[in-house]
């Protein structure tokens, strides 16, 4: 590996702003905000809009879309 060309890989806290879910993991993302974690150390904080605690697929609130009906409507409309 060449020295000096890789981003810094460090521990970062990701926070879901919609559900207040937080997880400590490693990333190359940087942030000006910091947060004090449960172990007493301060880590950079990266805020995200969607995580596994708020995404409809993982929460079981996903909607099933009838794509075949949409395709049929499209074909009927532009069949001319």
Image (cartoon, rainbow, N blue to C red):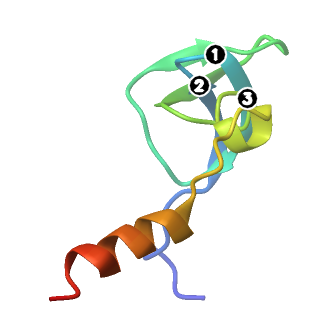
Q: Kindly indicate whether the residue at mark 2 contacts the one at mark 1 (C-beta within 8 angstroms).
A: yes
Compare residues 77 and 44 and report the one nearer the observer. 77
The circle on residue 53 is 3
Compare residues 21 and 3 and report the one nearer the observer. 21
| Foreground disc of the pair 2, 3 | 3
- What's the residue at 23%, 87% (across, down)? 79
User: Residue 48 placed where, x, y %?
Assistant: 50, 33
Residue behind mark 1? 19
Name the image quarter holding residue 12. top right
- Whether residue 15 sits left or right of residue 29 in the image: it is right
- Whether residue 62 sits left or right of residue 60 in the image: it is left
Q: Is residue 13 above or below residue 10?
A: above
Q: Is residue 67 above or below residue 53?
A: below
Numbered disc 1: secondary structure? loop
- What's the residue at 60%, 88% (across, down)? 1
Q: Reading the chain from its start, which is encountered first: label 1 or label 3?
A: 1
Marks 2 and 3, how far apart in space?
8 Å
Q: Residues within 10 Å of mark 1 (few under 14, many from 20)?
A: some
Residue behind mark 2? 16
Q: Kindly indicate whether the residue at mark 3 contacts the one at mark 1 (C-beta within 8 angstroms).
A: yes
- What's the residue at 64%, 36% (across, down)? 55
Disc count in the image?
3
- Whether residue 78 sits left or right of residue 73 in the image: it is left
Residue with the most extreme left position: 80
- What's the residue at 43%, 76% (across, down)? 5
Name the image quarter holding residue 54. top right
Name the image quarter holding residue 60. top right
Numbered disc 3: secondary structure? loop
Q: Is residue 63 above or below residue 74?
A: above
User: Residue 77 placed where, x, y %?
Assistant: 23, 73
Marks 1 and 2, how far apart in space?
6 Å
């Amino acid at each position: 590996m060449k020295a000096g060309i890789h981003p810094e890989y460090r521990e970062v806290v990701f926070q879901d702003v919609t559900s207040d879910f937080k997880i400590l993991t490693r990333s190359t993302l940087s942030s000006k905000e910091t947060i004090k974690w449960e172990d007493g150390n301060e880590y950079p904080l990266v805020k995200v809009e969607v995580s596994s605690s708020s995404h409809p697929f993982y929460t079981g609130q996903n909607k099933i879309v009838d794509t075949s009906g949409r395709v049929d409507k499209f074909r009927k409309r532009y069949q001319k």
